[in-house]
Image: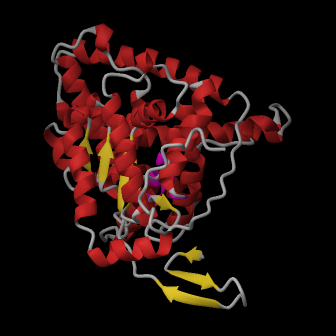
Amino acid sequence: LMIGDHQYSRRCINCWFDKRFPLPKLSKKVIYLDQFVISNMMKQLDPNTPPSQRGHHAGFFQELFQTLDRVCKLQLAVCPESCVHDHESVVTGAHYENLRRVFRHLSYGVRLHSPDGIFHRQAVKCFEAWLAGSIPEMLGERRMALDGKVDAWTDKIRIDLNYTVPGLAKELSKAVDAKTKHLHGVCSSWQQEPDFSFKSIFENEVCELGRSVLNQFAGYLGKFERASRGELAVSEIAFPPHEVSLMHSLLRVAENAAENPGLRLEKIAAFFASKAFQKVPYVKVWGLFWATLARVVRSGMKPDNFPTGSIYNDLDVIAAYSPYCDAMFVDLEVESLSRQGDLGRCLATGAKFFSLRSKEAFLDYLKEVERNASSEHLALVKDVYGSSAGTPFLSLLTWD
């Protein structure tokens, strides 16, 4: 039996005659799982995890894995992996391999593009529309964010390759520490601001996002010039930041609007300062998230409770992925922020948010996905994948 996207074939074991059968189109639910969900499910599957370390919600996470694995195997949902999963797993050291097995098992080869990449695609589309005086198209299509065959019938065989980047875990940990220090300073300034304004925080964060792109690009050009004169090692410019790729794309788009390179840069700077840039999905959520967090911090949050640098990952996930997911299971803090004021109204058109506060509702949501599947679909799944289709792979971490 061989399965390929929207067809499968059977072969006679005697004469090797093949016959192909068509498979109907699917529309799977896309479900994003926060790293803490992956970690807790991994603890339930790993027999080496002591009972004392399985957590207060051990029974829930065991049931959650079984339910998720079942709806994915029934071709009703997929839980795409992301670079955020990989980066937050690699810093755990010894647990990395097991964490990777869990999130890749549930992803079935579907991967979300990096948050930077999604911001890049959205910004280019919106810049093109801004120059043309039109409304940007395709921003809500899944292919903007997802890589892989989301709605395909999955094969029984998965080839999984792994590699690690030497020193990556150390650099990621250092980056989080630096972001934590910076963020605590920002939180203090929010609390001391005499004329606090939600609107001003939103606009300042959006403007800073645009300025950061321009500054990173200018800084890289300076390094490139020094390297071309032999004053800087070539390795210093071998891996340009993502802002450089974005600027090159925007400059190509601006070629039709201005022949002079200087005028093209002016067009891009004007776009970053425009209302159109504020409406880029990633940018809008980015600004509203920080403004909402600032309001919460200002309401009396103690310094010991200030968020850490890891919240940047949460922000990237929400800003980049929420428009393209049907549901997201996040931590309590992020779910609380996601329901507030302007940010809540902005996110209401995208994914449904769940957390441990609404864990039973999340299980009900997943079970409802299966209940809504037709009897014909479930019968076909059993015919294609066998009578055990939908059985959770509880030996995922012990199977060799």
Residue 282 visible (yes or no): no
Residue positioned 34% across, 55% down in the render:
325
Quadrant of the image occupied by residue 170? top right
- Give the magenta range: 109-121
**Dividing the image into 4 quarters, which one contains the N terminus?**
bottom right
| Depth check, front residue: 145 or 190 | 145
Question: At which x and y percent is residue 77?
Answer: 37, 60
Quadrant of the image occupied by residue 306? top left
Residue positioned 73% across, 40% down in the render:
237
Residue 166 visible (yes or no): yes
Q: Is residue 20 left or right of residue 121?
A: right
Question: At which x and y percent is residue 344?
Answer: 18, 43
- Total count of labels: 0
| Depth check, front residue: 253 or 298 | 298
Question: At which x and y percent is residue 218?
Answer: 59, 40
Q: Is residue 42 magenta?
A: no
Question: At which x and y percent is residue 4?
Answer: 56, 76
Q: Is residue 354 left or right of residue 155?
A: left
Residue 320, above or below 204 = below
Residue positioned 54% across, 52% down in the render:
246
Q: Is residue 341 left or right of residue 253?
A: left
Residue 296, above or below 41 = above
| Depth check, front residue: 301 or 221 | 301
